[in-house]
Image (cartoon, helix red, strand yellow):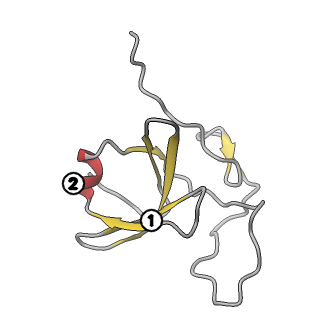
Amino acid sequence: MDIYTGEIYGKQTASKFVMYNVLKVSKAIVTLQNIDNPLSLFETTAQKLAASGYIRISQTPYVDLVSATPKRRKAARKPTRCPHTFDFLEDRSDSQRPAPILPDLFN
């Protein structure tokens, strides 16, 4: 399974669908950040990610414009394109949260 920086992965929990942004990918470690809680980071491997039930939601990065506040520290990465750019393949702009892809359990 190939994982790239900027992709969005999600997992269905008992109460809600949680989405994670891929911050960093090294040879064996993948660093994920919770989209709803930017302070929540964790590291895992690609094999554990697939085995735990995470699915790729989007290959286009999510840029949160609502809670974006200026930080005193140096910004880690800047978006490579305008967050308002509409991606017709993803059917959303970068600043819009991706729709979760839920498996069809009843068919």
Q: Mark 1 or mark 2: which comes first in sequence?
A: 1
- Residue type, numbered disc 2: Gln
Residue shown at 35% from the left, 58% from the top = 3
Residue shown at 63% from the left, 83% from the top = 75
Front residue (pair 27, 49)? 49
**Mark 1 lies on residue:** 5
Task: Give the crowd class for mark 1: few <14, some 14-19, many >=20 residues within 10 Å.
Answer: some
Question: Disc 1 versus disc 2: distance between alpha carbons?
Answer: 16 Å
The single residue placed furthest to the bottom in the displayed view is 73
Locate residue 106: give its quadrant.
top left
- Residue type, numbered disc 1: Thr
Q: Quadrant of the C terminus?
A: top left
Residue 9 x, y percent position in the rendering = 44, 49
Locate residue 84: give its quadrant.
bottom right
Q: Is residue 58 above or below residue 100?
A: below
**Mark 2 lies on residue:** 47
